């Protein structure tokens, strides 16, 4: 299997971050690693999404929360400005 190009990798990152922002996965609102690729374009293999989630966690944009049988992720509130630049706009406040 081929690896994603740089443009594909950036698009996958944007899609993942955008999904978590739209789902308001900040603070204590976690999402399971297996649920992240759901609803995203099927033109990219699921393994590419999982690899990119791991890279985002290593960079600190995502925070990891371990449950007994599954890894959970959420957006890092402290890096909100960087996340906004990846998504391409301001993140509206949660009411």
Image: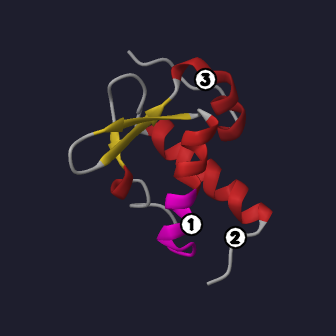
Cβ–Cβ under 8 Å for marks 2 and 1: yes
Question: Of residues 58 and 19, which is closer to you in this image?
Answer: 58
Residue 62 in the image, given as x and y percentages of width and height: 52, 36
Give SS at disc 2: loop
Q: Which residue range is magenta in the image?
A: 42-51
Q: Is residue 31 above or below residue 6?
A: above
Residue 1 in the image, given as x and y percentages of width and height: 61, 84
Residue 64 in the image, given as x and y percentages of width and height: 42, 37
Give SS at disc 1: helix
Which mark identifies residue 4? 2
Image quarter where the C terminus lies is: top left
| Residue bearing the label numbered 1 | 48
Q: Is residue 16 above or below residue 1?
A: above
Between discs 1 and 3, the one toward the N terminus: 1
Q: Is residue 93 above or below residue 8?
A: above
State yes or no: residue 17 in magenta: no
């Amino acid at each position: 299997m081929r690896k994603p190009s740089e443009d594909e990798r950036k698009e996958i990152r944007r899609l993942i971050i955008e999904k978590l922002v739209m789902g308001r996965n900040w603070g204590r609102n976690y999402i399971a690693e297996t649920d992240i690729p759901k609803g995203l374009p099927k033109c990219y293999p699921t393994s590419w999404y999982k690899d990119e989630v791991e890279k985002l966690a290593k960079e600190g944009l995502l925070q990891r929360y371990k449950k007994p049988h599954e890894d959970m992720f959420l957006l890092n509130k402290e890096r909100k400005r960087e996340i906004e630049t990846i998504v391409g706009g301001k993140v509206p406040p949660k009411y």
